[in-house]
Image (spheres, rainbow, N blue to C red):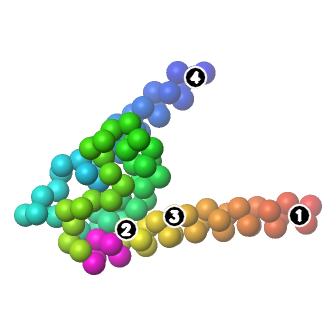
């Protein structure tokens, strides 16, 4: 049972690690843009955990296009965490009426 869960978890970690901020993929000639900011915001919780074990991985890409990257990053972080709180509220509200 554990091996069935462990294999997809390791596979997901490797896939997320390949496109994580700070991986060396982006340079000053090819910086991370708005869409990369959205992606990095979505995977921020995972990259935070990976960054504890791998010093080259960061939760924010320093080689970016500036304001547009920041805007995409924050939109993704806020929408991701905000939607989780809405789901929790909706479930609590529904369970109170039962």
What x and y, as percent, mark residue 27?
Answer: 12, 58
Which of the labelled discs sits on residue 80, or is there none? 3
Q: Is residue 48 rendered magenta in the image?
A: no
Report the residue at 32% width, 66% height from top. 37
Q: Which residues are magenta?
A: 67-71
**CA distance separating discs 4 and 3:** 28 Å
The image shows residue 10, relative to residue 48, as above or below, that is above
The answer to which of 25 and 1 lies nearer the viewer is: 25
Q: Earlier in the sequence, mark 2 or mark 4?
A: 4
Q: Earlier in the sequence, mark 3 or mark 2?
A: 2
Label 1 near label 2: C-beta < 8 Å?
no
Screen quadrant of the C terminus? bottom right
Q: The residue tagged with tag 2: helix, strand or loop?
A: helix
**CA distance separating discs 2 and 4:** 34 Å
Q: Nearer the viewer, mark 2 or mark 1?
A: 2
The image shows residue 98, relative to residue 25, as above or below, that is below
Q: The residue tagged with tag 1: helix, strand or loop?
A: helix
Pointer 2 residue? 73
Pointer 4 residue? 2
Q: The residue tagged with tag 3: helix, strand or loop?
A: helix
Which of the labelled discs sits on residue 24, or is there none? none
The answer to which of 54 and 70 lies nearer the viewer is: 54
Pointer 1 residue? 96
Q: Earlier in the sequence, mark 3 or mark 1?
A: 3
Label 2 near label 3: C-beta < 8 Å?
no
Q: Earlier in the sequence, mark 4 or mark 3?
A: 4
Q: Is residue 83 left or right of residue 75?
A: right
Mark 4, Cα crowd under 10 Å, few <14 / some 14-19 / many 20+, is few
Label 4 near label 1: C-beta < 8 Å?
no
């Amino acid at each position: 049972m554990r091996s069935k869960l462990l294999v997809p978890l390791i596979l997901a970690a490797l896939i997320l690690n390949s496109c994580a901020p700070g991986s060396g993929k982006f340079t000053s000639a090819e910086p991370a843009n708005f869409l990369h900011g959205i992606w990095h915001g979505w995977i921020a919780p995972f990259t935070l955990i990976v960054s504890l074990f791998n010093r080259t991985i960061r939760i924010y890409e320093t080689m970016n296009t500036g304001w547009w990257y920041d805007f995409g990053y924050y939109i993704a972080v806020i929408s991701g965490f905000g939607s989780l709180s809405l789901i929790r509220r909706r479930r609590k509200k529904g369970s109170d009426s039962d």
